[in-house]
Image: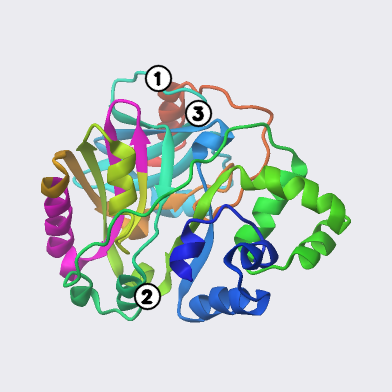
Amino acid sequence: MLEDIYKLKRLTSTRIAKVLNESVRNVISLFKMHSKAGIHIKPDIDIRALGVKHQIVIIKGYVPNTDLIVSSSQVFSYIRSISYIFPRSVMVVFETSECVSVDYDYYCIESTIRSRPDPVMLFKAADGEYERVFRDSLPDPIPIPLARRGRFDWYDLEILRVVSREPWIKLKNLAKRLRIKEKNLLKHIPHAENFITGYRVAKIDRLREDSAISYLVSVEFDRPRYFCSRVVRHPFVISCGECSDKRALVYAASPAGVSPLFINFVRRLVDETGARIEKIYTGCHKCLLVTTIGSRSTGEFIPREGWRVPNIEDEVRNLVEKKLIIPA
């Protein structure tokens, strides 16, 4: 059933059960069973549907001031995350309506696909059987529906927010939570569903605790979406970004002891598809700092009065002046 749910553009256990011809109880049990096993499943919301792009900037010679960032009350208006990259560099991810040219290494992600691991490999990873994960062949790519871009209102955002926290919620309970009649909610839900591409594994508790190394892999390929739909089948892969310049950007996290096996897996996949690895950035997954403004890795969204193109040079200068990133 999990493989079917990965592909579904439906919100609430009531609507999922109807499509799968399953009981609502079985759908709720699936979500809660995985949650108890340390596997957290949530709707996957594509940034393209929200009119957002992610511009990744690598700033060499600086590192995150982790303690200050964690304790800081500063507002990171257009910064989604900050993380440490070896050696002596920092990676900052900006949310923007358009990517701009800057004097740093940078990438522009226009669409995202997040983790949809093969169920057998998924449970091995959840049990900490990391070496066994690599004994299985990666399954075929999973069909991933496209999200539809459009305008969204408060109800759309609230539906996405609540279902991201409780993917098993019933339709009637969601209506009570939003203080709206069920028949009126049914008018909003199909619109909110336009923004999702299916369901993803948002977090694997055991893997998150054990993962020490993060990877950002830039891959050149003429079909980046196809490459992403394959690589997200591995439980170590957190997300894959599709770029307009025929690049795929893979973000992954691995326990240190099996990181060579993961890199070998990526190289095999690249060889099989005829792609080419352009660059591999290595970092510290535990130093990934996600801000609380805008969209988050948890799948939560808050409204903004439109999106602008931030002046990235000014934003970086501001981080340096406030000592949120410091010279290495």
Find the magenta span and give its range: 241-270
Vertical side of 241 occupied by 313: above or below: above
Q: Residue furthest top?
A: 101
Determine contact: label 2, label 1, CB under 8 Å. Answer: no
Q: Classify mark 3: helix, strand or loop.
A: strand
Can residue 327 be seen here? no
Residue 31 position within the rendered picture, expressed as x and y whole percent measured from the top left: 55, 73
Per the model, the C-alpha gap separating discs 3 and 2 is 33 Å
Residue 96 numbered tag: 3
> On screen, 110 above or below 239?
above
Is 251 part of what is drawn in magenta?
A: yes
- Residue placed under numbered mark 1 in the picture: 100
The three-letter amino acid code for the residue at tag 1 is Val
Disc 1, disc 3: CB below 8 Å? yes
Residue 23 at x, y percent in the picture: 65, 76
**What amino acid is found at the position of numbered circle 2 in the picture?**
Arg
Residue in front for this viewpoint, 188 or 79: 188
User: What residue lies at 31% left-to-right and 53% top-to-bottom?
Assistant: 141
Residue at the spot 30% in from the left edge and 29% down from the top edge: 106
Q: Which amino acid does label 3 sit on?
A: Thr
Q: Position of residue 126 (x, y in %)?
A: 36, 76
Q: In this view, does 249 lie to the left or right of 259?
A: right
**Quadrant assignment, res 293:** top right
